[in-house]
Image: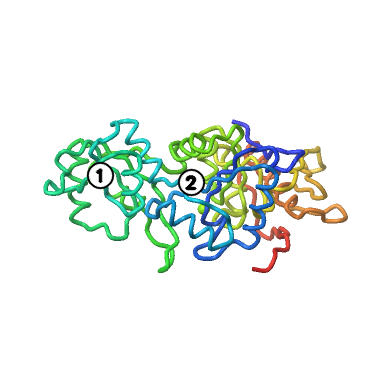
Amino acid sequence: MVAVLASSAVPLAAHYDLGMLDLDGVVYIGDHAVPGAAAALSTARESGMRLAFITNNASRTPEAVAAHLTDLGVEAGAADVVTSAQAAARVAVERFGEGAPVVCLGGAGLLAALVAAGLSPVGVSDADGGGKAVAVVTGYGPDVVWRDIMHAAVRIRDGLPWIASNTDGTFPSAAGIAPGHGVLVDMLNRFTGVTPVVAGKPERPLLDETVRRMGGERPLMIGDRLDTDIEGARRVGTDSLLVLTGVSGIADLVAAPPHCRPTYLASDLAGLSVPHPDPRSYAGETGPEWVVGAWSARVADGRLTVEADGAPGDTDDAWRAAVAAAWDHLDRTGDVADIAGLSLPRRARPER
Ligand SMILES: [Mg+2]
């Protein structure tokens, strides 16, 4: 696979008709909006891009997610939100049919999604109807108790099909970075030897469900993580924009294998409303030079350096040039460029 940064002569929000937005690290960070996110999304909508808010978090209902977004100044209704719980419910109803009894091991969002999809959620013990279940569906739930996990583990080991909302190892909580549903999945897998069908990013069902429901002809995935958002987009063949307001940064980018590389790169969601220039390469004295806008980047003696040629222009172009040079170096040599001492300019952000 060859994966290089792409260009767009028109703003991305004018070219792509559906923006599939990851939430944490993109639109908000915990309880706070990412600075400028609400205004950037409203500008993107004015260019004709419809927005879907997608999340691997299976514990909150779409209504709760939409209310949180509205509080942060981002216009959103429940119908604009797609959760991994909904994608898991879709997988279950497609496999087992409407009305099928399925064990719900998770939070309120998972239970609501199973009911909304027409399934009949049951508890996991015999007394709660678990004996007649045709599958187990799991998701993060803060009140899930060990007894139920134990029962579910035995049923899965004994052959009941298992669908997991997501495999995130961590999630941001009020108590700090906390173990996500992926930790429970690992534990159940260790005991049962079974690998679940996974609904959330980077697997297909969540993105497929989003496109199916929102009806985009040209969807664009927008996320902050190479290993979920961007890899998930590559798997479904969708273009993607990485924003630098969340988890993945320059160290992840320069080391990214082709299947985790975004189509576009911007410091934040304002990148939706600008054209993206073409990275060009030239033969330099010490190897290829990559030029984007006013910036050029090269890897010499394994070290990545970036410089501006006169007026700096869009500082995001410095990042794009750096990444283009680093990927070219990685693909040619197999070595990750050394970024020690590299200083990339950040665009001035609006005050929160
Ligand atoms: Mg995120």
Alpha carbon distance from label 2 to label 1:
22 Å
As displayed, is residue 89 above or below residue 175? above
Q: Closer to the camera, 223 or 293?
A: 223
Query: From where the camera sits, is residue 301 visible?
Result: no
Residue at position x 48%, y 46% in the image: 79
Using a 10 Å C-alpha cutoff, classify the residue at mark 1 as few (fewer than 14 neighbours), some (14 to 19) or many (20 or more): many
The amino acid marked with disc number 2 is Ala
Q: Secondary structure at mark 1?
A: strand
Q: Is residue 171 above or below residue 193?
A: below
Pick whichever of labels 2 and 1 is earlier in the sequence. 2
Residue 179 picture location, percent across and down: 37, 58
Characterize the local packing of mark 2: few (<14), some (14-19) or many (20 or more) Cα atoms within 10 angstroms: few
Residue 64 pos. (x, y %) = 43, 57
The quadrant of the picture occupied by the N terminus is top right
- Given residues 86 and 345, the one toward you in this image is 86
**Which mark's residue is nearer the viewer, 2 or 1?**
2
Query: Residue 156: in sight, yes or no?
Result: yes
Q: Which mark is residue 121?
A: 1
Closest to the observer, 259 or 68: 68
- Inspect the image, locate mark 1, and give the three-letter code of the amino acid beneath it: Pro
Instruction: Indicate whether 143 appears above or below 115.
Output: below
- Circle 2: element type: helix
Which residue is disc 2 drawn over? 79
Residue 90, given in percent of the width and then of the height, sits at 37, 37
